[in-house]
Amino acid sequence: MATQTRVSHRHVLDLDIFSQNEIEEMLDTADSMKEILSREIKQVPTLRGRTVVNMFYEDSTRTRISFELAARALSANVVNFTARGSSVEKGESLIDTVRTLQALGADIIVIRHKQSGAPYLVAQHFAGAVLNAGDGWHAHPTQALLDLFTIREQLGHIEGCKVVIVGDILHSRVARSNIWGLTKMRARVTLCAPPTLIGPTRFWKANWPELDIIYDLDAALEGADVVMALRLQKERQQSGLLPSLREYNRYFALTAERLAELGDDVLVMHPGPMNEGVEIMPEVAVAPQSVIETQVTNGVAMRMALLYRLAS
Amino acid sequence: MTNEKQILSAEEIRRSLTRIAHEIAERNEGVQNVILVGIRRRGVPLARRIAAALADFEGQQVPIGQLDITLYRDDLHMRGPAPLVRKTEIQADITQRVVVLVDDVLYTGRTVRAALDALADLGRPMCIQLAVLVDRGHRELPIRADFVGKNVPTSREERVEVRLSEVDDEPDQVTIVRSE
């Protein structure tokens, strides 16, 4: 057997502890999983008899369904747990819930929580594996991996690509995990947003000196291979971080004009759900350069790869 | 101390594969309905070589596929970290075709069992046949090969090492290694 790096982490809580080789290996595994999804029978017996619990303390469509389809494609038993309608409403704590799920035979917990760090707490109290499906403003590693997978699949490589992340970076777990992943894979990353939605430059530069931070979108987009728009939550305006959504749209949205400037070879990405007409115009979301739906499809393959890795 | 003994030279490998190709054509009365499916990794270059031999004397290019059986293994929970999953690529539809599975060494039969399950998920072949370069015995399942390059009696303590220039960056040979 050839010696290869092995992803030996017991949990996937963020991409910070993944090396470039480990990420590369996860992307290769996802590529193999994608073939299974193209078959008539989209299922392999690998995780038969294992139980995956999706614990979603926050609403989600694509991530939850994507995890559920991924677990089923590997023949695992899937249990969907939502805070609503559970003992959480009677005041059961997260830790007690995890202990209960463990006693019920859960092997893998997939957790989405609005509190940053919640998956780390779960990992301390659970004997199986924990997969972070998004925690607060902190991390969303499976989204970042599927974004990396999509970039590599579409462009053939990640290293050296110029990736512009535009939007509410300050509050975005997608941005943070993508910055970890993209910089590990040696992409050139540019952040673009109004200063109030980026946060202190000092923080970014201290952790990733190679990041470019540009407040003017047209300048940021120059020479971009990939542009990733982030969802702008409407509450941001109420909290005074933005003068108006219309102004945000004028200066920071992906519009048909900006897309025309970028040319035919650029990739337009968005982690969803989109606010069409705010950070991205409807015609851009469905333009030939848009791989937003491909991201969703690739999400299932990527999560199969992660569940497979964590199950052994 | 280890000692390593050659059991097939490059030339013998070539002759075995040519003979297997002839036997496949003979058994199936030609190769018009045959698909060769190599089990990753070393079954794949072997399938290619058999296909090249068939193209040579049957004048027909037989479709080749590659099968990764990792996700169908029965020992995943017993091993350490999960082995790498490589891609299964079979372009042609296998339903109603004669699938000849190709692998380097037949030992316990568990890999072939996994390959049979994997094929069943891809379609319903008319029949499945098995070609191996070396059969070393010690079956743990009721499986036998249809086409065998060489039968080699071994003990369980020995290892059979197949080296193929395409994947190993070394000249072709099969050796038997005994650790003492």
Image (spheres, coloured by chain):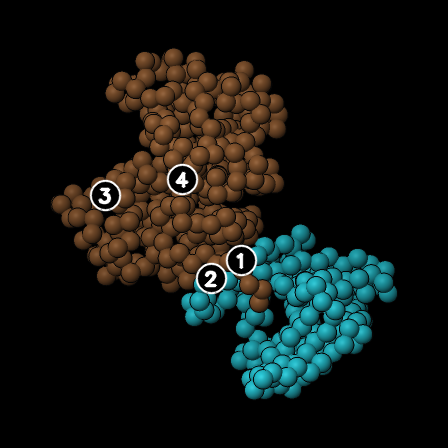
Front residue (pair A268, A296) = A268
Q: Amino acid at mark 2?
A: Ala
Decide: few, some or many residues near mark 1? Use Cα within 10 Å; few <14, some 14-19, many ≥20.
many
Colour that chain A carries in the picture: brown
Rounded to the nearest whole Å, what is the CA distance between mark 4 and mark 2?
A: 24 Å
Residue B136 in sight: no
User: A275 left or right of A23?
Assistant: left
Label 1: chain letter:
B
Instruction: Give the SS element for disc 4.
Output: helix
Q: Are marks 2 and 1 on the same chain?
A: yes
Rounded to the nearest whole Å, what is the CA distance between mark 3 and mark 1?
A: 35 Å
User: Residue B57: percent from the left, percent from the top?
Assistant: 86, 65
Colour that chain B carries in the picture: cyan
Query: What is the number of the mark on residue B85?
Result: 1
Q: Amino acid at mark 4?
A: Ser
Instruction: Give the SS element for disc 3.
Output: loop
Query: What is the number of the mark on residue B82?
Result: 2
Label 2: chain letter:
B
Q: Please state which of the two labelled residues, at mark 3 or mark 2, is closer to the viewer.
A: 2
Front residue (pair A168, A70) = A168
According to the image, label 3 marks what residue? A83
Q: Residue at x 48, y 43 (%)?
A: A184
On screen, residue A136 above or below A307: above
> For residue B79, what is the image quadrant?
bottom left
Query: What is the number of the mark on residue A177?
Result: 4
Q: Please state which of the two labelled residues, at mark 4 or mark 2, is closer to the viewer.
A: 4
